[in-house]
Image (spheres, rainbow, N blue to C red):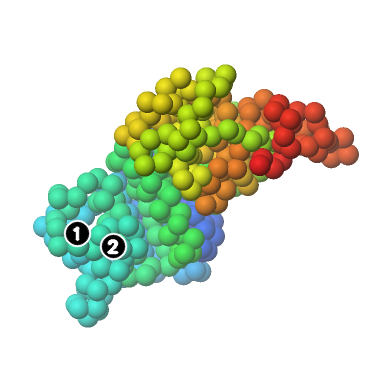
Amino acid sequence: MIRLDRVTKQFPGGTTAVDDLSLTAPTGKITVLVGPSGCGKTTTLRMINRMIEPTSGTITIDDQDVSALDAAELRRGIGYVIQHGGLFPHRTVERNVASVPLLLGHDKKKSIARARELLELVGIDPGLGRRYPSQLSGGQQQRVGVARALAADPPVMLMDEPFSAVDPVVREQLQDEFLRLQGELGKTIVLVTHDIDEAIKLGDHIAVLAVGGRLAQVASPHQLLTHPADTFVADFLGKDRGYRALGFDGAEVPLHHESTVVLRDGAITDPAPHDDPWTLVVDESGHPLGWASTDRLGQITASDELALGGTLARRDGSLRSALDAALSSPSRRGVVVDDSGTLVGTCRAHQVLSVIEEQERPEEERVPAHEGGEGGDDGLDPRAPR
């Protein structure tokens, strides 16, 4: 557990970067510091590992006052990840990862072997270990930075905008990989970001800081979205916070059977004409490939781009994913899959909204989804497409 108790940092000239901050980062959880530029996020992070000394207050890690510890020894026991990976350009990738274990006096052969294991863990081919950072993509460098932070198996990790230097697609991949790793390793993590969506996705707890380093609110992502403490927090969260809060709400939504065609051996099988302008194309295993214009079915080949939409919703997923799947689909029918990625049916935006409205009613007045008259417009059981 990391605890900050009435921590203040004033720089020469009188600028207050952090003001009387009290905050706890629980063991084994991800605590995210978020807020506008100049709110003291990075200063707070750097005070934890004593790269910056606080003006007043105390910081403890597992009840040990960090000011009483040797600064270099403290930092070797804390994983630290920054933007762009912060890798040593003159060292190979595997040597970068092995840096801290070697500093701690660990056996060289074992340290390199451990580095290769960690590269594989974060999704880097160990064969790239003998390359230099400049020979890797930005996303690969960020993964190496995470591997290096994990090399000495630290109980605590500090991460300063770790995924901000890559494009949105790679960033999402890195976030997903990071959550997978955290699920396996259970580190105590303090992460800084300016992106509220990233904070909501990654954080178990989110601390919103205002300019001047004042703590505006600390809460779980769902609590933050549904009950912002004041106007500042509400404005920082943005105007679509109600929609984002749906990402934490799961519910059964009506599902519909969907007529499909199969792309087999590079061509559509049995492209029978019908009135619907859109037809869903699946592979031989029933995995959705995308929507195609019905009048072009006979011309579709394996090399064609199919419009799947922005989201595939999971059958047991959130209301947000179901609604987004419907709204982003060119057919306005959200594609719903099971855990193996196999099609189970489609959903409609207006019916997802009906479920949301139903959740707002007192429990004794709620109508089960299959009794509400909003079921399959094709006459099928809306709960279980066949």
Q: Residues within 10 Å of mark 1 (few under 14, many from 20)?
A: some
On the image, the x and y values in percent for residue 332 come to 56, 24
Q: Which residue is mark 2?
A: 119
Residue 80, quarter of picture: bottom left
Against 22, residue 322 (above or below) is above
On the image, the x and y values in percent for residue 61 come to 46, 65
Against 52, residue 196 (above or below) is above
Determine the residue positioned at 23% across, 63% down: 126
Determine the residue positioned at 37% across, 48% down: 174
195 or 13, nearer to the observer: 195
Give the residue type that dot 1 points to. Answer: Leu
321 or 269, nearer to the observer: 269
Give the residue type that dot 2 points to. Answer: Leu
Determine the residue positioned at 43% across, 67% down: 155
Against 318, residue 74 (above or below) is below
Q: Which residue is mark 1?
A: 128
334 or 15, nearer to the observer: 334
Q: Secondary structure at mark 2?
A: helix
User: Marks 1 and 2, Cα distance to the nearest angstrom?
Assistant: 9 Å
Determine if residue 22 is in view: no
Indicate left or right for 39 with 304 as reference.
right
**Image quarter hosting the C terminus:** top right
Mark 2 or mark 1, which is nearer the start of the sequence?
A: 2
* Total count of labels: 2
Q: Residues within 10 Å of mark 2 (few under 14, many from 20)?
A: many
Indicate left or right for 81 with 326 as reference.
left
Whether residues under marks 1 and 2 lie with C-beta atoms below 8 angstroms apart, the answer is: yes
Residue 168, quarter of picture: top left
Q: Residue furthest left?
A: 90
Determine if residue 107 is in view: yes
On the image, the x and y values in percent for residue 142 come to 29, 51
Q: Residue furthest bottom?
A: 107
